[in-house]
Amino acid sequence: MLGKQAPQSLALGQLGSTFIDDTDNHVGQWGRIYCIAACTFTTLTSGNLPDGTKCMVGSALTGITLSPGMELQGIFTVIKLASGKVVAYNI
């Protein structure tokens, strides 16, 4: 469950992060994905909120390209890039 200070810790990256620049399947728990180089997602799977509610339904974000500097926020459990570089911030 996310703690009271989680949003600030997430924004500051105090909970750690994962740099992804390959096309491997990455499994974890991230709350923010920041695009460093134009990136396209092959897989972007959402997790559940602490109360069990699904955070994102469907796969509308797969196959689109984000520009450098753009970010996604939510709860993500699987990230696979077709191309690009991102930093995924832990929750």
Image: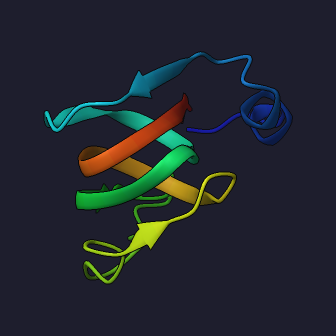
Q: Quadrant of residue 78?
A: top left
What's the colour scheme?
Answer: rainbow
Could you say which is closer to the camera, residue 51 or residue 78? Answer: 78
Q: Quadrant of residue 27?
A: top left
Instruction: Give x and y (percent) for residue 41.
Output: 29, 59
Residue 39 to residue 59: above or below? above
- Residue at left offset 45%, top offset 22%: 18
Residue 72 appears in the rendering = yes
Residue 55 appears in the rendering = no
In the picture, the quarter occupied by the C terminus is top right
- Residue at left offset 61%, top offset 53%: 68
Could you say which is closer to the camera, residue 77 or residue 44? Answer: 44
Instruction: Give x and y (percent) for residue 82.
Output: 21, 53
Instruction: Give x and y (percent) for residue 28.
Output: 32, 31
Residue 9 to residue 75: above or below? above
In the picture, the quarter occupied by the N terminus is top right
- Residue at left offset 48%, top offset 38%: 86
> Is residue 15 toward the left or the right of residue 19 in the image?
right
Say how many tags the image has.
Answer: 0
- Residue at left offset 49%, top offset 60%: 51
Instruction: Give x and y (percent) for residue 49.
Output: 49, 58
